[in-house]
Structures are given as structure tokens and as C-alpha cells.
Image (cartoon, rainbow, N blue to C red):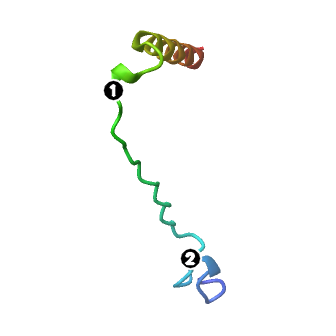
Amino acid sequence: MEETGAVPPGNVRGETRWTRRARAAKPEIKLTPGKGAADLTVPLEQILDAVVKVVFSHATTQAC
């Protein structure tokens, strides 16, 4: 300011280039009533076995 006698362009009042923008709202998650474990087409043990394998393999690749 002392050199040019004016405020630098990025510091002028009303400058919006450096302000933070609001994040876009995430869509709502709509839950629907489930049918229950009795209506599954795959046994629950098989589903849990697959999930545990995926989580374990993902965790081990991150640790390397």
C-alpha cells in the first residue's frame, strides 16, 4: 500500500476470489423397510464371510 498508494487487487472489499464456498449438500439417504433375514436369497453366513474377506484384504493392502 505504501508503494502504490492503493490496496492490492486481491484485498479490495467485495473480492470473492479467495472466499470459501459453501459445500454442496449431500442427497438424503432414504431408508426403506427391509424384508428381513428370512427372505435373503443367500445365507447370512455367506454374506458375512464375503464382507470379512473384503475388509481384511483392503486393510492389509493399506498396511504395506
Tell me: residue 32, above or below residue 1: above
Tell me: residue 6, above or below residue 43: below
Which secondary structure, mark 2?
Answer: loop
Q: Residue at x 41, y 53 (%)?
A: 28
The residue indicated by pointer 1 is 36
Q: Residue at x 52, y 12 (%)?
A: 53
Q: Is residue 26 left or right of residue 18?
A: left
Extreme right residue here? 4
Tell me: residue 36, above or below residue 51: below
Q: Is residue 23 left or right of residue 30?
A: right
Quadrant, the N terminus? bottom right
Q: Position of residue 9 (x, y in %)?
A: 64, 81
Q: Position of residue 4 (x, y in %)?
A: 66, 86
Hey, which quadrant is residue 7 in on the image?
bottom right
Query: The disc labelled 2 sits on which kind of residue?
Result: Thr
Q: Earlier in the sequence, mark 1 or mark 2?
A: 2
Confirm or deny contact between disc 1 and disc 2 (CB under 8 A).
no
The label on residue 16 is: 2
Total marks placed: 2
Q: Residues within 10 Å of mark 2 (few under 14, many from 20)?
A: few
Q: Residue at x 50, y 18 (%)?
A: 55
Q: Give the CA distance from mark 1 to mark 2.
A: 52 Å
Q: Position of residue 16 (x, y in %)?
A: 56, 76
Which secondary structure, mark 1?
Answer: loop
Q: Position of residue 40 (x, y in %)?
A: 42, 21
Q: State the residue in front, 5 or 35.
A: 35
Query: The disc labelled 1 sits on which kind of residue?
Result: Gly
Q: Residues within 10 Å of mark 1 (few under 14, many from 20)?
A: few
Q: Is residue 64 left or right of residue 39?
A: right
Q: State the residue in front, 26 or 30.
A: 30
Q: Residue at x 50, y 61 (%)?
A: 24
